[in-house]
Image (cartoon, helix red, strand yellow):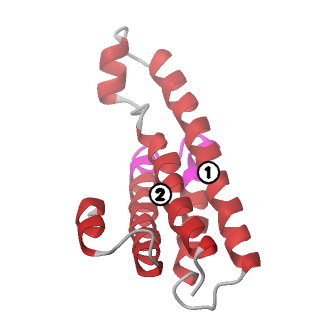
């Protein structure tokens, strides 16, 4: 999608940046659904499994409002803070998933990764954060 966008809209234009934010909004929504369903499989056994669900819902809410209100410096700053928290949650999630796989039920680390918590899944949050921040930065730097 990003490659198609780069071919169809000139960067760094205002519309290009809005599409970038829209694509990251879709990614955060997908991450919300996936973290909710994946962690629900074990009944949210650990309280920390609620953290990516809550943080992704905040990101979805903040980025969805982006398309319905006039953009102000305060709002863009608030979005930036929420997005930076997403990166923090992703890095912490990577550590927690890796620890769960190191101390999993199987003797094989490989089998724990296959059947247990995927360690690289939480790193989607920092990737989406970078994508959304690029869009917000372009909008901040090139206001309409």
Of residue 85 and residue 8, the one placed in the foreground of this image is 8
The picture quadrant where one finds residue 120 is top left
- Check the picture and name the quadrant holding the C terminus: bottom right
Q: Position of residue 12 (x, y in %)?
A: 45, 69
Q: Is residue 83 left or right of residue 28?
A: right
Please tell me whether mark 1 sits on a helix, a strand or a loop: helix
Is the magenta region chiefly helix, strand or loop? helix
Label placed on residue 51: 1
For the residue pair 120 and 71, the one nearer the viewer reads as 71
Q: Residue furthest top?
A: 107
Q: Is residue 79 above or below residue 55?
A: below
Q: Quadrant of residue 91?
A: top right
Is 42 inside the magenta-drawn segment? Answer: yes
Q: Is residue 79 above or below residue 38?
A: below
- Where's the N terminus, which quadrant? bottom left
Residue at x-position 36% and y-position 21%? 112
Between the C-alphas of marks 2 and 1, the distance is 21 Å
Left or right of residue 77: residue 116: left
In front: label 2 or label 1: 2
What's the magenta region?
Answer: 38-52
């Amino acid at each position: 999608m990003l490659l198609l966008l780069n071919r169809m809209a000139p960067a760094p234009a205002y519309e290009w940046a809005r599409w970038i934010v829209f694509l990251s909004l879709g990614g955060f929504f997908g991450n919300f659904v996936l973290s909710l369903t994946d962690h629900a499989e074990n009944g949210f056994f650990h309280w920390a499994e609620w953290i990516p669900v809550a943080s992704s819902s905040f990101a979805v809410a903040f980025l969805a409002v982006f398309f319905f209100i006039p953009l102000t410096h305060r709002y863009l700053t608030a979005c930036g803070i929420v997005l930076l928290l997403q990166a923090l949650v992703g890095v912490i999630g990577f550590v927690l998933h890796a620890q769960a796989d190191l101390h999993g039920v199987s003797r094989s680390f490989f089998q724990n990764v296959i059947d247990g918590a995927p360690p690289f899944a939480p790193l989607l949050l920092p990737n989406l954060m970078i994508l959304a921040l690029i869009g917000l930065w372009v909008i901040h730097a090139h206001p309409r």
